[in-house]
Image (tube, rainbow, N blue to C red):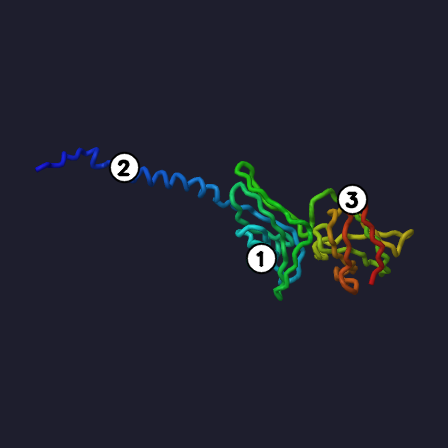
Amino acid sequence: MTTAPPRTAASAWRPILLVAALLACLFGAVAPAGAATAEATIPVTVTAATKPGDTVLISGNTAELGNWNPAAAVPLHTTAQTYPAWSGYIQIIEGSTAQYKFLIRSSTGAVTWESVPNRTVTHSTTVPVAINDRWNVGSGAPVTAVFRATATTAYGQNLYLAGNLAELGGWDPAKAVPLSTDGAHYPLWTAGLQLPPNTPIEYKYLIKNPDGTVVWENGGNRTAVTPATGTFTTNDTWR
């Protein structure tokens, strides 16, 4: 009768060590892939003039940004103290680049996308990244805008300009742009300021009375698009 040789402590552990080595190889192979898909958080701020009940959102070409689906877009938030700035956070794969745009959803569910080209953000593992944009405003050097409006006013009244950009006060009469006139030019009022290039704008004129009350001109919002370079000039008449 043949007996098996006695097993040493080392030979008893050999199968366990082999299994452990195989598991280590497997997990070692998948670990780098898991690290490559780690997500980073990026703060977002966009200046956008909105109407009561509107919500500003951000969407883009990644699953984290909703894959351009407005229903899956990331909502941003504002307060009475921070408006017209809307802010929030998005997730992005570490080291990756994503395309994105902002959209506004009205209280009735209607969606308006900004018309500028797709924006991009690239996450960096060494430099802090944050998004700080303005609604429907692309990149480029500002252009000089000259607003000219003919308006007959009473003593103590002054003409102002308000619109959908931060430079135009974000439709807030308290932040509206004052126009000026004098005895040689009245009833022509003028104001000069810097505006972003290639940008659709909406604006209206308003009169502020001595008691602080405000009268908006009639009709719908005036619209224009600023040029890529040079000077933008209007010649309007109070309605």
Estimate the spatial distance between the alpha carbons at disc 1 and disc 2, rounded to whole Å. 50 Å
Report helix, strand or loop for mark 3. loop
Relative image position of residue 168 (x, y in whole percent) = 73, 52
Of tags 1 and 3, which is closer to the observer? Answer: 1
- Identify the residue shown where x is 77% and y is 50%: 226
Q: Earlier in the sequence, mark 1 or mark 3?
A: 1
Q: Earlier in the sequence, mark 1 or mark 2?
A: 2
Of tags 3 and 2, which is closer to the observer? Answer: 2
Estimate the spatial distance between the alpha carbons at disc 1 and disc 3, rounded to whole Å. 34 Å
Q: Of residues 226 and 18, which is closer to you in this image?
A: 18
Q: Are marks 1 and 3 in contact (CB under 8 Å)?
A: no
Instruction: Tell me: residue 25, above or below residue 148.
Output: above
Q: Which mark is residue 229?
A: 3
Report helix, strand or loop for mark 1. loop
Residue type indicated by callout 3 = Thr
Q: Which residue is mark 2?
A: 17
Residue 155 is left or right of residue 228, and the answer is right
Q: Dot 1: few (<14), some (14–19), or many (≥20) neighbours within 10 Å? A: few
Q: Which residue is mark 1?
A: 69
Kindly give the residue lying farthest to the bottom in the view shown: 108
Residue 176 is left or right of residue 67, and the answer is right
- Identify the residue shown where x is 56% and y is 60%: 71
The image quarter containing residue 20 is: top left
Q: Are marks 3 and 2 in contact (CB under 8 Å)?
A: no
Q: Dot 2: few (<14), some (14–19), or many (≥20) neighbours within 10 Å? A: few
